[in-house]
């Protein structure tokens, strides 16, 4: 498993606590995110993650025809595309409207007169799995306006009519109760029912059990209805439109007809899979041959705001086909991107590949991971996204190891299972500039990663200008700086090597533009220009699993 | 293994580009279009390709059995596919990067979807109108609706290629020995 770095967002930790939770606990992974999923609020100078931002919908569009649907018609069309976009029930790809074949010439050769539009009846055709809607009987007279043609058919389905009747039945009572309790403002009305009574009916529906289509229980409902409108008039008993047993055959009720169908089944593909069925509003037949095409559900474009200062972090463009953003305050534009690598694994991989065709699996794992009782160097590469150079300081957070899972050696388990050494002084990372602006200077120490990997465990100097060193700045290249650290793993260590690391960086913004970074940062020097700002964030570094050693070796500690 | 003797019989109305790798005893019928960078290897036995077929770039048609491999008319072998079947019928479509093993016999109007692996361990014949799709190579039977329009499209496709390819590619002519 490759080593990873995740960044900490303090939204989960509460008001006063700013330090991240210990990384070896399973629940702490919720607070750590990869850099590409984080945002940065300039006003608050804080990192925001997807969990703490407030999200609002900025528009709806159909993913197939890229038509932007106004929010008013979204509700009317039940969150589906109102134009000719349908989805194949078998393979979920988009269906194409095709005309039927012209009548055959008899000898198999296509007849000459193939008109441009084609001949009715038109049907839907899936190019991927070759399913067509004529198999379920869905055909159209005209190749356009399919949704309208299908709408009539859908509305006359017995489930739909039953649902309409239910809504009409509840409407007067819910309206009076909602008017008396809250000041609900009915929003834009669809052409079916006013919004408030529909949402109230929906909440009433949530209150009762979830039956199948046919299991209507009129006495139960009237009881619920009585609870809902507690002090209001009595609700008359509801009579369903048709007999329950008739309705039971429509859905999968587990009664006789279903059992017969299962007995006659030949292959497993005859039963529709869960993925194909769970998008339906009501239960439908289980057979694959009964699956109908459905209209493509709409997607929404969201804009995200900082929860405290309400500043917009992400605002997409209004056009559905554009993937760019009007406002895009992502953390990757503010925080240095960090990657961590274990050079000894890379060296092993490079040498192992041209060799044995069938390498020993255990050897592979041993070679790649870290073994208990040894020490390994690791490389941290920091990439500076700002247009100014930054000074970075790293520090490892103290870890309180209260209980280690391995209970065989309770004495030794009290010791921290591994020790990390990182460069303690601050080091600079150059500014980001376009590729053609770089004057290629320093690889300051000019070391290759392979050399370093092969020298593991040999050197212990933490500073100094020795030829080979593992801890300290290793390489500076464009706006990337590679620093080396070392991890010493105790003999009794188990689990993953994970530690929290505090990263603080300071930068000068020479131009006094307020747009670069917000005010209110913790440390500011007095000088007008240049101003020095500091930002601090936590990360968790996961170097990978520890493999226990079998034989006894002198510990390196 | 005896050395492979090349013997190409290419119809005068077929369009075979110069950059095609041909090996062995190959017969190509009239109206067939072979794009550059295609590969047709008749290693152990001969290959006979019918009329109106379209073999696109990086397609590999290989015959490793001693029996004749017969490919029918009006088939479409899309980019990157690999076909080793002993027999292929008419009007089939083998989509991009699909692989069909030598244990399979394809009949007519079949569609092998993109990146599908049709590699059964036992010998198998795909019925007419079989459609194979999805990452797990699920099968279903096409009802055949729309086949005339598709056949018409195939003919137009081949006709357009026959007209356009020689303008931009060198053609291989005749037979080699």
Image: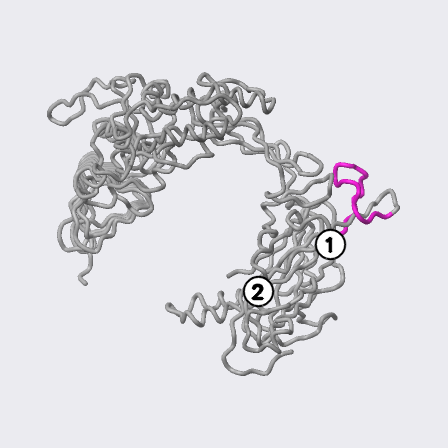
Q: Nearer the viewer, residue A190 or A260?
A: A260
Cα–Cα gap, marks 2 and 1: 23 Å
Give the answer, above or below, for where B22 lies relative to A146: below
- Furthest residue toward right: A526
Where residue B136 sits: x, y (%)? 31, 47
Magenta residues, as a range? A505-525
User: Is the C terminus of chain A in the top left, top right, bottom left or bottom right quadrant?
Assistant: bottom right
Circles 2 and 1: CB distance less than 8 Å?
no
The chain holding disc 1 is A
Q: Position of residue B26 (x, y in %)?
A: 18, 47
Query: Residue A195 vs residue A533: left or right?
Result: left
Disc 2 target residue: A342
Residue A420 pos. (x, y %): 66, 68
Q: Secondary structure at mark 1?
A: strand
Tell me the residue at 68%/75% (across/down).
Answer: A460
Q: Residue at x 78, y 37 (%)?
A: A514
| Left or right for A78, reference A135 | right
Q: Earlier in the sequence, mark 2 or mark 1?
A: 2
Between tags 2 and 1, which lies in front? 1
**Residue A157: image location, x then y, percent:** 31, 24
In the rendered structure, find residue A504 and report the number of the disc placed on it: 1
Magenta segment, prevailing SS (helix, strand or loop)? loop
Colour scheme: one colour
Q: Is A339 on the left-hand or right-hand side of B8? A: right
Q: In this view of the protein, can residue A9 be seen by the observer?
A: yes
């Amino acid at each position: 498993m490759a080593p990873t770095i995740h960044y900490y967002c303090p939204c989960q930790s509460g008001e006063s606590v700013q330090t991240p939770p210990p990384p070896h606990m399973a629940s702490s992974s919720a607070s750590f995110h990869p850099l590409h999923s984080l945002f940065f609020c300039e006003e608050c100078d804080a990192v925001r993650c997807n969990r703490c931002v407030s999200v609002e919908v900025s528009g709806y569009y159909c993913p197939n025809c890229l038509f932007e649907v106004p929010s008013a018609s979204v509700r009317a069309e039940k969150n589906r595309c109102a134009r000719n976009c349908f989805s194949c029930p078998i393979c979920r790809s988009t269906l194409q409207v095709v005309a039927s074949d012209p009548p055959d010439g008899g000898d198999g050769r296509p007849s000459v007169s193939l008109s441009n539009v084609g001949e009715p009846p038109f049907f839907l055709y899936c190019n991927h799995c070759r399913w067509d809607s004529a198999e379920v009987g869905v055909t159209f007279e005209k190749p356009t306006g399919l949704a309208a043609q299908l709408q009539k058919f859908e509305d006359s389905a017995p489930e739909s009519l039953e649902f309409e009747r239910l809504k009409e039945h509840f409407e007067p009572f819910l309206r009076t109760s909602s008017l008396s309790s809250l000041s609900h403002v009915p929003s834009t009305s669809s052409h079916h029912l006013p919004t408030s009574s529909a949402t109230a009916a929906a909440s009433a529906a949530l209150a009762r059990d979830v039956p199948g289509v046919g299991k209507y229980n009129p006495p139960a409902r009237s009881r619920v209805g009585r609870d809902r409108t507690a002090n209001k008039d009595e609700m008359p008993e509801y009579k369903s439109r048709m007999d329950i047993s008739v309705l039971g055959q429509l859905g999968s009720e587990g009664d006789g007809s279903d059992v017969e169908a299962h007995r006659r089944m030949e292959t497993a593909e005859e039963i529709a899979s869960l993925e194909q069925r769970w998008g339906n509003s009501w239960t439908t037949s289980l057979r694959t041959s009964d699956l109908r095409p459905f209209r493509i559900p709409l997607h929404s474009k969201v804009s995200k705001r900082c929860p405290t200062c309400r500043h917009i972090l992400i605002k997409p463009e209004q056009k559905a086909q554009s993937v760019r953003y009007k406002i895009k305050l992502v953390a990757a534009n503010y925080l240095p991107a960090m990657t961590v690598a274990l050079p000894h694994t890379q060296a092993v991989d490079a040498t192992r590949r041209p060799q044995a065709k069938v390498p020993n699996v255990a050897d592979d794992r041993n070679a790649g991971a870290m073994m208990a009782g040894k020490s390994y160097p690791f490389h941290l590469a920091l990439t500076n996204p700002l247009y100014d150079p930054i000074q970075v300081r790293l520090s490892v957070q103290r870890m309180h190891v209260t209980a280690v899972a391995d209970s065989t050696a309770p004495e030794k388990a009290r010791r921290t299972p591994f020790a990390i050494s990182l460069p303690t002084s601050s080091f600079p990372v150059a500014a980001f500039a376009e590729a053609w602006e770089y004057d290629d200077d320093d690889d300051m120490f000019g070391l290759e990663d392979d050399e370093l990997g092969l020298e593991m465990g040999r050197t212990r100097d933490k500073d100094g200008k020795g030829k080979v060193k593992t801890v300290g700045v290793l390489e500076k290249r464009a706006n990337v700086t590679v620093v080396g650290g070392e991890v010493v793993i105790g003999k009794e260590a188990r689990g993953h090597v994970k530690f929290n690391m505090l990263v603080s960086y300071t930068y000068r913004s020479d131009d006094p533009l307020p747009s670069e970074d917000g005010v209110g940062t913790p440390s500011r020097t007095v000088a007008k220009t240049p101003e020095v700002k500091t930002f601090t964030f936590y990360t968790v570094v996961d170097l990978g699993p520890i493999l226990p050693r079998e034989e006894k070796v002198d510990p390196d500690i | 293994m005896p050395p492979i003797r090349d013997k190409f019989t290419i119809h005068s109305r077929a369009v075979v580009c110069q950059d095609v790798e041909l090996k062995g005893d190959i017969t190509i019928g009239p109206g067939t279009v072979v794009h550059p960078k295609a590969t047709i290897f008749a290693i152990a036995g001969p290959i006979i390709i019918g009329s109106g077929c379209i073999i696109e770039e990086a397609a590999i048609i290989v015959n490793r059995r001693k029996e004749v491999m017969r490919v029918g008319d009006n088939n479409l072998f899309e980019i990157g596919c690999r076909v080793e079947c002993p027999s292929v019928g008419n009007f089939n479509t083998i989509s991009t990067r699909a692989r069909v093993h030598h244990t399979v016999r394809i009949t007519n109007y079949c569609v092998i979807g993109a990146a599908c692996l049709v590699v059964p361990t036992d010998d198998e014949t795909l019925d007419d109108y079989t459609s194979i799709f999805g990452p797990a190579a699920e099968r279903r039977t096409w009802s055949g609706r729309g086949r005339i329009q598709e056949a018409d499209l195939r003919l137009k496709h081949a006709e357009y290629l026959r007209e356009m390819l020689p303008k931009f590619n060198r053609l291989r002519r005749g037979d080699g020995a």
